[in-house]
Amino acid sequence: MEKGFREGDFIETRLGLIFDVKGLIHPSNKVIAFIRYYPDKAGERRGKSRHFKKVYSLHKRYEWLKKNFPEYLVYDPVFDEVLCEVPINHVKKRYTPTRVIQRLRKAENLDSLENAVLEMASLLKFSARIPWKAIGASGSVMVGLHTHGSDIDLVIYGSENCWKVYSTIKSLFEEPSSLLKPYSLDELRKLFEFRSRDTIMSFKDFVTVESRKSFQGKFMDRNFFIRFVKDFSEIGEKYGDVRYKNCGYARVEAVVVDDAEAIFTPCKYKIGDVKVVEGPKLEPIREIVSFRGRFCEQARKGETVVAQGKLEHVTDNRSGCEYFRLLLGNRPTDCMILKH
């Protein structure tokens, strides 16, 4: 089994369970991942040899695992929480986004989604002038479980390539003839209805931040979502180098002082002028982070935000540095909105 599991990859177990990999840092003999598809005769997704069902919200994923495969839900002492961790010796197959693009480029007969994925990947590759190895396709198309109406899920690797693609999309959004288009208000309402299943916020707050994001929108009338992921060489952290301790739930008001990692998954916002509105009065709270793509590009440098999530004590064993951070995405009540 090759090493280096990362955001955007999928893994399939010997029993046919398909998980999506979370983050870039994993234990040596396990993969932190969440159930995405499972075999079911009544499933609406059809693979080559059987049908599958898809699990959407994070809450439902935990529920399903607790009921069906509780052995995958384990307490992780580094992250101080119960996570889904799949032993590497349970993994039958690993799916990587870059291989999907390679396959589509060689294929002769593509269906409508595969064609749209390849066209969008090609547009970004040539417009942003990045190498083919820096772009991949994740999601249902990667495992052959897509439907006629499935979304386009792309992944861009490497900070330099990510920023090139990010600025390219912003430019293309401004061109009237471009196939890439930002969401309209009606489309944002549909997205809000879907997201509000496990992230609670008002439609007004939702529109304020989502309307200016450049990693999502429409391509050839399909929804697209792009993950920006750092290269392995840019990750200077191994599992256990940094440890986290749950300190409770908190709501804070703060100013974003650095948004240089706001587009990446996982995303990070360095903050200052922090006021704890509710929860443990601990300091210094230096950053807001999330492993969920929906919290990317949520705020910009200089903006004041109100955010609530899990408060964690961070100990960096490499430098001896200690501080607190707010982690978003574990609960439906987790949020980050701009202060009006």
Image (cartoon, rainbow, N blue to C red):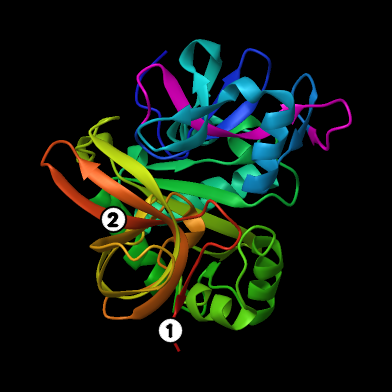
Taking depth in this image into account, of 328 and 221 the one nearest to the observer is 328
Please say if 41 is above or below 187: above
- On screen, residue 232 versus residue 253, left or right, reads left
Toward the bottom, the furthest residue is 340
Taking the image as shown, residue 59 lies to the left or right of residue 244, namely: right
- The image position of residue 190, as x and y in percent, is 71, 69
Task: Find residue 128 and report its image quarter.
Answer: bottom left
Residue at label 1? 339
The residue depicted at 58 percent of the width and 31 percent of the height is 19
Q: Tag 2's secondary structure?
A: strand
In the rendered image, residue 328 lying in the magenta stretch gets the answer: no
> Is residue 254 depicted above or below 82 in this figure?
below
* Residue beneath the point at 61% across and 46% down: 115
Position of residue 25 measured from the top left corner of the image (x, y, whole percent): 34, 34
Q: Residue at x 23, y 62 (%)?
A: 284
Q: Could you say which is closer to the camera, residue 229 or residue 306?
A: 306
Q: Which quadrant of the rendered structure holds the C terminus? A: bottom left
Q: Amino acid at mark 1?
A: Lys
Q: Position of residue 326 (x, y in %)?
A: 38, 58
Asked whether the beta carbons under mark 1 and mark 2 sit within 8 Å of each other, the answer is: no
Please state which amino acid type lies under the numbered disc 2: Phe
Mark 1 or mark 2: name the one nearer the start of the chain.
2
Q: Which residue is mark 2?
A: 324
Find the magenta span and give its range: 26-45
Q: Position of residue 60 (x, y in %)?
A: 70, 43
Q: Is residue 39 magenta?
A: yes
Q: Secondary structure at mark 1?
A: loop
- The mark closer to the camera, 1 or 2, is 2
The crowding category of the residue bearing disc 2, from other C-alpha atoms within 10 Å (few below 14, some 14 to 19, many at least 20), is many
Is 144 on the left-hand or right-hand side of 81? Answer: right
